[in-house]
Amino acid sequence: MSDPRTNELRFTIDIPCQPKQRTANTISNGKVRRYTPEETRSFEATISQLAWVAMRSAGYKTAQSVPVHLMIEFTFAVPKSLSAKVRAARMGNYHINKPDLTNLCKSIEDGCNGVVYTDDSQIASISMTKHWGTETKTLVLFQWTP
């Protein structure tokens, strides 16, 4: 996006990302109730807070009815329990183990609902990677033109 009016919002998540979990079901008084597991709700609330602080610091308002572009880079720390040779071989390479990339992304998308954008249906493009590194962190970048 080369438009000078383009808003860019960047923030870093310094805790391990929680992949989106499936909704759970319970039966109460003969009715099925669906709910989001606590781990997912808690992580999405943390993302919402991080996004809110980043939005306010940048002076942005929630993107309304415009396409939003999302880029995410997930970095997983190579376990210290691995040999130095294996650690060196993994460093910087793609992380092809669980958790699934799309489930990681979905938690961030949902956590940013109502903060960065009105609804995650506004996300028009996504670029995401998952790789090994020295520390666990996630870099998030949103772009939109108001």
Image: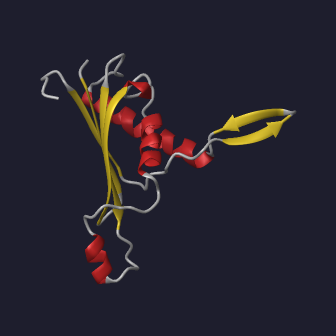
> Does residue 117 lie above or below 11 as drawn?
above
**Which residue reaches farthest right?**
29
Q: Looking at the figure, which quarter contains the C terminus?
A: top left
Rendering coords of residue 108 (x, y %): 42, 41
Q: Looking at the figure, which quarter contains the N terminus?
A: top left
Rendering coords of residue 2 (x, y %): 12, 27
Rendering coords of residue 92 (x, y %): 25, 64
Foreground of the two, 139 or 23: 23
Rendering coords of residue 81 (x, y %): 41, 79
Q: Is residue 142 visible?
A: yes
Task: Tell whether 82 sits left or right of 39.
Answer: left
> Does residue 48 lie above or below 119 as drawn?
below
Q: Is residue 73 visible?
A: no
What is the quadrant of residue 57 in the picture? top left
Q: Give the residue displayed 35% in from the left and 61% down from the top.
A: 95
Q: Give the residue displayed 36% in from the left and 53% down from the top.
A: 14
Q: Give the residue displayed 31% in from the left and 76% down from the top.
A: 87
